[in-house]
Image (spheres, helix red, strand yellow):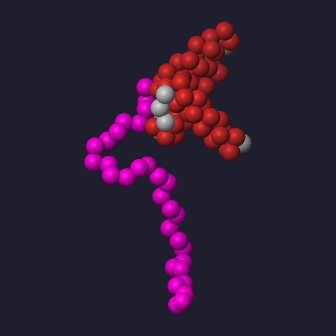
């Protein structure tokens, strides 16, 4: 279930980025997840199913407005940090 949810959030981010003509990496995954979670919770509480398309459109607009702000002083791209190794590597003498 977690893998499906992750891929659905990434798919929605890619769709929003294509509509906004920006890179999908410009949208923060954590912010996108929280926006989608909030909007879908609100949509589930709303019993008027005719409002779902407008709620989804509002969610996509919020994702565009929450694009990652380029912060000055950053010299490196956003990447996932590597996990610290538990044991040091044995270096062979070649």
Q: Is residue 81 above or below residue 63?
A: below
Q: Residue at left 43%, top 32%?
A: 67
Q: Residue at left 58%, top 13%?
A: 54
Q: In the image, 77: left or right of 86?
A: left
Q: Residue at left 52%, top 34%?
A: 32
Give residue 40's quadrant in the image.
top right
Q: Inspect this view and state whether residue 37 appears.
A: no
Q: Residue at left 65%, top 40%?
A: 7
Horizontal and vertical percent position of residue 81:
48, 58
Q: Which residue lies furthest to the front in this view?
A: 94
Q: Is residue 11 above or below residue 77?
A: above
> Principal SS element in the magenta part?
loop
- Determine if the magenta segment contains residue 66: yes
Query: How many numbered discs sit on the rendered protein?
Result: 0
Q: Is residue 84 above or below residue 12?
A: below
Horizontal and vertical percent position of residue 28:
47, 39
Q: In the image, 33: left or right of 50?
A: left
- Determine if the magenta segment contains residue 47: no
Q: Is 43 or 10 nearer to us in this picture? A: 10
Horizontal and vertical percent position of residue 25:
49, 40
First to last magenta residue range: 65-94
Q: Is 53 or 38 nearer to us in this picture? A: 53
Horizontal and vertical percent position of residue 21:
49, 28
Query: The N terminus appears in which quarter of the rendering?
Result: top right
Query: The C terminus appears in which quarter of the rendering?
Result: bottom right
């Amino acid at each position: 279930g977690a893998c499906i949810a992750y891929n659905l959030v990434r798919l929605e981010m890619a769709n929003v980025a294509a509509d906004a003509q920006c890179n999908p990496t410009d949208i923060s995954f954590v912010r996108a997840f929280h926006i989608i979670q909030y909007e879908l919770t609100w949509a589930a509480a709303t019993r008027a199913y005719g409002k779902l398309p407008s709620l989804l459109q509002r969610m996509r607009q919020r994702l565009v407005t929450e694009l990652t702000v380029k912060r000055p002083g950053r010299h490196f791209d956003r990447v996932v940090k590597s996990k610290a190794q538990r044991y040091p590597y044995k270096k062979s003498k070649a």
